[in-house]
Image (cartoon, rainbow, N blue to C red):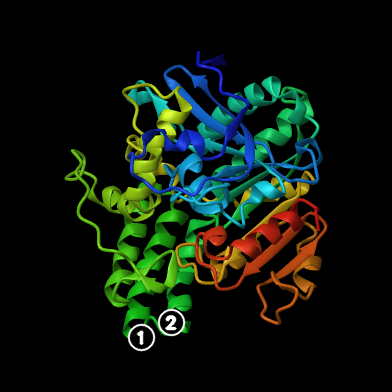
Amino acid sequence: MELVPRVPSAPRWPLLLPLLLGLSAGAAIDWPTEEGKEAWDYVTVRKDAHMFWWLYYSTNPCKNFSELPLVMWLQGGPGGSSTGFGNFEEIGPLSSNLKPRNTTWLQSASLLFVDNPVGTGFSYVNDSNAYAKDLATVASDMMVLLKAFFSSHKDFQTVPFYIFSESYGGKMAAGISLELYKAVQQGTIKCNFSGVALGDSWISPVDSVMSWGPYLYSMSLLDDKGLAEVSNVAERVLDAINKEQYKEATQLWEEAEMVIEKNTDGVNFYNILTKSTPTSAMESGLEFLRSHLVRLCQRHVRHLEGDTLSQLMNGPIRKKLKIIPEDISWGAQSPKVFMNMEEDFMKPVVSIVDELLEAGVNVTVYNGQLDLIVDTMGQEAWLRKLTWPGLSKFSQLKWKALYSNPKSLETSAFVKAYKNLAFYWILRAGHMVPSDQGDMALKMMRLVTQQE
């Protein structure tokens, strides 16, 4: 492991002041009233592979950061940026319009955003052979980063450390959590690892694909003929996965999505109550040979890199950070990140979740009611495949209603928990739960980190 030389980050910044550095002179900006302590850096996790992280210390007015947990957020894609999307669109202190977020998780935890796998966001590779191609590499890279982080931030070694994730980030979080658990047991990483939360997570791709038809049909988004078409291609995905033909399964996954878009008049895979925005074909020298990968990348990574966010990250944020190499643009390598993980996409990691539960690691699963790409039916299906001895007791429990507003009778979520497994059904939320239901997401984080 080698730390990349950098200019030291200032320990205290007004949350907005450095962001103004790249804005036009006439821009009208609301100045924030609070200051927050931040740090960021690069870690070289392998030869030619550099990973970027960004830490925000909690801004709770009543507690020191050492009295609150540390939450690491992992974005999906693969190729989605935690320091960009997770930070400015979901749980960080400011929105992509630089307005303070009322539901930021920073009020109840310190936040660590990491751009992984390498090549994502501000992370980058110097050689095309350095991209990660499987979950094992993703997890081992993160172990290098976390060892460096906790070694240089000893104040966080005793603070409860949780990994929260979304989408493909959940699949990565499962693998990372198992390796982190082992590293802590062996004493190679010093931290107080306290649990992992898998949000709308791509844990068992085949269970998601197999449930798409029934879910859409139950929501009046497919008719009998459409259901038959979707079910047909889903069965082909299942057959390919059963034969461990993962590249073919990836191609069939994309075919299934196209069948769904055709039959539903373009339903949005991230919220079934909305429609997908048509996108122009991505310019790529690989498009002729790997067009299904290009289309998948458009659908599942490009939405994490909207124009407003991209301009923010490559403008004011880049100037604030001061350590981004001149030839690196935020998000520029993300399509290559996605395409290099092709053989990993459709592999399930249910067995890893089983190992985590058996080891006593706290595992939380949460899912948005309106998500399609990782619908709740699919999540429940893979959960039933667990061999964890506590599963039967978990299944027999009745869920409990949760209310984000104690003065309202409107149900925000349901929860069921037994021993070290919990499941949250988040109502009126799509794939990006904190974006759609910020209050409930914040409440859930507090519950998971034992603050409520």
Q: Is residue 78 found left or right of 37 in the rendered image?
A: left
* Above/below status of 260 relative to 293: below
Q: Quadrant of residue 337?
A: top left
Quadrant of the rendered structure where residue 388 is? bottom right
Residue 104 spot, x, y in % from top left: 61, 52
Residue 30, image x, y percentages: 49, 49
The residue to which callout 2 is attached is 217
Badge 1 density bin: few <14, some 14–19, many ≥20, Cα 10 Å:
some
Q: Nearer the viewer, residue 390 or 405?
A: 405
Where residue 256 appears, x then y in whole percent?
34, 65
Classify residue 221 as left or right of residue 411: left
Which of 434 and 120 lies nearest the eye of the viewer? 434
Q: Judge from the rendering whether residue 406 lies leftward or rightward of residue 33; answer left or right.
A: right
Seen from the viewer's position, the closer of residues 209 and 414 is 414
Is residue 337 visible in the rendered structure shown here?
yes
Q: Position of residue 401 (x, y in %)?
A: 73, 75
Residue for badge 1: 223
Q: At 42% across and 19% down in the image, what residue appears?
A: 48
N-terminal of the pair, mark 1 or mark 2, is: 2
Q: Residue at (58%, 51%) from the top-left corner?
A: 91
> Which residue occupies the foreground of this view, 19 or 203?
19
In the picture shown, does residue 227 fall above or below 30? below
Please name the amino acid that badge 2 sits on.
Tyr
Name the amino acid type tagged 1. Answer: Asp
In terms of secondary structure, where does tag 1 sit? Answer: loop
Numbered circles on residues, count? 2
Q: Are marks 1 and 2 in contact (CB under 8 Å)?
A: yes
Q: Is residue 18 above or below residue 447?
A: above
- Which quadrant, please, contains the C terminus? bottom right
Q: CA distance from mark 1 to mark 2?
A: 6 Å
Secondary structure beneath dot 2 equals helix
